[in-house]
Amino acid sequence: MAAEKQTATDSESDLEATNHLVPNSDYEPLLKLLRTHPALDGLELDEQRWQLLDRFCGILAAYNEKVNLVANTTPEVLVNRHILDGLTVASNIYKSKVTSGKLIDIGSGGGLPAMVIAIACPDLAVTMVDSVGKKVKFLNEASQELGLVNNIALTARAEELARVKGERASYDLATARAVGTLTLTIELCLPFLKRNGLYMAQKTVSRLDEELKDAKAMMRELECRVEQTKLFTDMPGVEDSVILLIRKIETTPHYYPRPWAKIKASK
């Protein structure tokens, strides 16, 4: 099968074994500062959501000691870079008014931004996809520990999962942070989207022009366009970040995404 759901079934799971390492509130003071961050304009989370973000930070940091999920889990980096980055996407989801739709995140790794989005958007159905089983196990165990019911993690390769019945052209939103170039992520994400669906591409301002130029042919081939460009100029932590809202216009040709060998050969 192209995808497999992984869940913790015994009481001695890896996550439970690391629970004693989870800090109580190392992240809470930094998370409180995010509540008024200018990049999160329009995002209103209740106290429960902020508490879940706090707990997720602790779970991720603890698990990261045995499985490499994130390079740096110090509170400052985890909150002011990774959590903030995910919340900027959540903020734009609220603005797009698709908070009760379906989102797929490709290359979910440690759950950034997918877990952050699932916490911040409880009515959004979030599917997290990663080819590494250990990472998928973490995502499902962390979701279970947090009591989240709106997300699921699958072990799969995106270019294969996109051909599975029920997955192709069935999502309203897609994300793929730190997976690769804009050209690559457009090819991987667009087949999952319905017509008029949005790919929220997280990129850096410093490489934006180059990536857009390189992706021009792929955007034309897959019939999508950049609808909005969200910049966060002079905003601490995300000053070099940009979110491209890429709208899918027409049905993706059946031969996309190509097999990985062909994608790799075309780089």
Image (cartoon, rainbow, N blue to C red):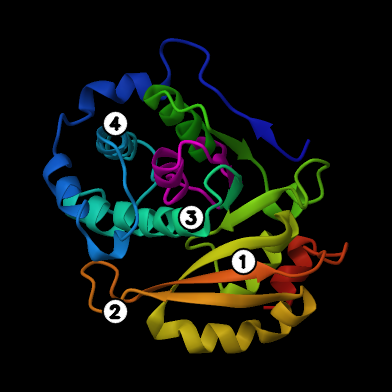
Q: Residue at x 77, y 63 (%)?
A: 257
Q: CA distance from mark 3 to mark 1?
A: 19 Å
Q: Which mark is residue 48?
A: 4
Q: Amino acid at mark 4?
A: Gln
Residue 85 point in image, percent of width and height: 35, 59
Distance between mark 3 and mark 2 Cα atoms: 20 Å
Q: CA distance from mark 1 to mark 2?
A: 24 Å
Mark closest to the chain's N terminus, 3 or 1 = 3
Q: Secondary structure at mark 1?
A: helix
State which tag comes first along the sequence, 4 or 1: 4
Q: Earlier in the sequence, mark 4 or mark 2?
A: 4
Instruction: Choose the circle earlier in sequence order: 4 or 3.
Output: 4
Q: Are marks 1 and 2 in contact (CB under 8 Å)?
A: no
Q: Nearer the viewer, mark 3 or mark 1?
A: 3
Question: Image quadrant of residue 84?
Answer: bottom left
Q: What's the amino acid at mark 1?
A: Thr
State which mark lies toward you, 3 or 2.
3
**Which residue is under mark 2?**
233
Give the residue pinned by disc 3. 93
CA neighbours of label 1 inside 10 A, class few (<14), some (14 to 19), many (20+): many
Question: Percent position (x, y) of residue 9?
Answer: 53, 14
Magenta stretch? 107-134
Residue position for label 1: 185
